[in-house]
Amino acid sequence: MKNITFFINTLSAAGGTQRVLTTLVNLLIEKYSIAIIVLDDKKPFFSIKPEIKIKQIVANGALKSFRLFDLNKQIYNELKNNSCDYYISLDSNSVLMQSLFMPRKTKLIVWEHFSLSKNFNNVLYRFSRYYASKRAHKFVLLSKQEVTDWSNLYNIPLKKISLTYNPITIKEELNDLDVHLYNNKKVLAIGNNVHVKGFDYLVKAWSLLDKNGWTLEIVGLSEKEQIKLNKIIDQYDIENDIIVKGRISNIKEKYLNSSIYCLCSRMEATPLVLIESQYIGLPAIVFDNCEGPLELIDDSGLVIEYENISNYSAALKKLIESKSLYEELSLRAKQNSVRFNRSTFYDKWCEVLS
């Protein structure tokens, strides 16, 4: 049985990365020995099968450079002592910080969750991405655009790249999805960062709209980010029309109680929430600045010019007032989501690890 080790800073967050990682390891554990290295001792937010080992590593040293050296050394020892076949990093920005030393047997796989074109541009991250392009055995990328970008910028052979879409992580039970979503009269947005997810754009677009009994719900924010968002909301006379909540575990229920999904991100790769909201049948409204979301929705949503707040608001108005358009896009969303099933996701990963 092959030994596979993943690295992620924390499993305690409620983000899409943690959710899709949890889904993957719970699938792979039937065939592989799985360990996850983390940097904290907090309990995982999502359920992980007991056979999966979770190992905490604490970097020591007074100076940051010594802490990074110690972190790499400890990870190296973990990989070597467990005779690890594959070491999987979920972020090329940090490969240099946690994959500098690798046992000869261990093959590095980069499972990239950031968009290359919208990634952070500081020198250390750029060098880490370059190092990853030369060091990695394989790249697992989330969209066709990412495959093109990584292949062109770093001259990575296509045989080293696997295009593997994120999967639907909620239970795939179509029999309970025959619901009248339009009647919920609720617009949904999910994310953990007000600026990155463009919630300020969304609030402004919402302020221009005649709501007709509809509400906007924004979920997934920490207390600090909720305070930040509420300050933005206070600038407009719309407090009663917007619900702001923290992270949630039963995300499927949130989808089922909504009608429309809004994505206003400044930076985005291939958001899991967009895939899953499509599966439920929520039409999406997205900006055109990020290639990943455009590839995901195909023709099952409305695409708006980036930062054009008035047009975004008009698109919301259009979907709210036209039930026929709503139902057409809802049906397309369900049909479109079929390609993101867990079985295909599992098979693609087994190919990567073969």
Image (cartoon, grey):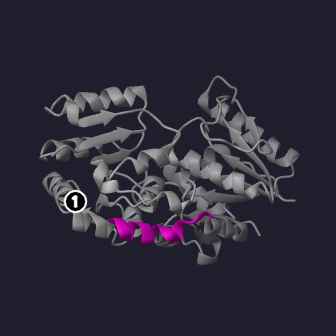
In the image: residue 211, left or right of residue 286 = left
State which region is magenta: 330-342
- Locate the N terminus by quadrant: bottom right
Q: Is residue 286 visible?
A: yes
In the image: residue 279, left or right of residue 141 = left
Say few, some or many: other residues with alpha carbon within 10 Å of mark 1 (under 14 / 14 to 19 / 20 or more): many
In the image: residue 36, left or right of residue 112 = right
Q: Residue 214: x, y in percent?
A: 22, 45
Nearest the camera: 200 or 149?
200
**Chief SS of the magenta region:** helix
Determine whether 277 is above or below 80 in the image: below
Residue at position x 19%, y 44% in the image: 206
Quadrant in the rendering for residue 171:
bottom right
User: What residue would you read off at disc 1?
Assistant: 319
Q: Residue 104: x, y in percent?
A: 82, 57
Residue at position x 70%, y 68% in the image: 352
Mark 1 residue type: Leu
